[in-house]
Image (tube, rainbow, N blue to C red):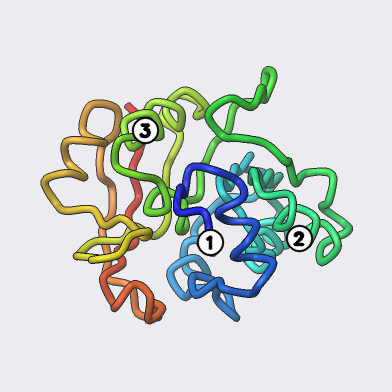
Amino acid sequence: MEERDSTKPDFWSHRYAVGRTPWQMDHVPEQLRVFLQSLEPGRRVLIPGCGEDFRAIEAFHRAGHQVTGIDFSPVAVESIKKTLPKVSGAIVLGDLFSYNFGAASFDLVYERSFLCSLPPRLWNDYVARVAQLLVPHGMLAGFFFYGNDPDPPPYPLTEAKASELFGGHFNLRKSAEVTDSLPIYDRNEKWLEWQLR
């Protein structure tokens, strides 16, 4: 029987191993493409729960940013390192919440399918960890899932919950509808840009 605890690496490794990855895109999302055009090169970017999202990592790398991806699934990390050998040294096998990044601080944390993979009991920990890893006035930007899901993950946000979660650390700078959302998210994603106070 498949492990149902999405906080464990085996849950995700099983899905990557059997190709059950409906959150994977076959292109760089439109909002990310537009965002990259507005971003000055040279930013230090962290992608938590990067999985096999080599397109996003490659897009940040090609745009001139120093990108680090972290995931606790050995299957996903091995796959993405093979796909992107030029940046394989920047792909970390580890847990975002406990991994020691040393003195590294990031200008940007890119969110895509990580927060909604976490049970809501871990959401406050996620926000605190992201705030800890960002430089002053750094940014959390990306895709956030809203709506309802009777069989999570993904775990959806609500407007009230997002304000409660992020309001203590961040100011919302931009909110936009997502034009190329995947079926798993049922057109309920939003592109959000949160700036650390």
Q: Earlier in the sequence, mark 3 or mark 2?
A: 2
Say what amino acid the circle numbered 2 marks: Ile
Position of 18 compared to 170: left or right?
A: right
- Residue at the disc numbered 3: 127
Would you identify the image quadrant in which residue 42 lies?
Answer: top right
**Distance between mark 1 and mark 2 Cα atoms:** 27 Å
Badge 3 element: helix
> Which numbered marker is on residue 45?
none
Instruction: Tell me what residue is drawn at x 53 percent, y 60 percent.
Output: 2
Position of 126 compared to 175: left or right?
A: right
> Which numbered marker is on residue 80?
2
Q: Is residue 195 above or below residue 103?
A: below
> Which numbered marker is on residue 1?
1
Q: Is residue 7 above or below residue 36?
A: above
Say what amino acid the circle numbered 3 marks: Val
Instruction: Tell me what residue is drawn at x 53 percent, y 61 percent.
Output: 1
Instruction: Tell me what residue is drawn at x 53 percent, y 29 percent.
Output: 97
Mark 3 and mark 2 residues within 8 Å of each other at the beta carbon: no
**Distance between mark 3 and mark 2 Cα atoms:** 26 Å
Q: Nearer the viewer, mark 1 or mark 2?
A: 1
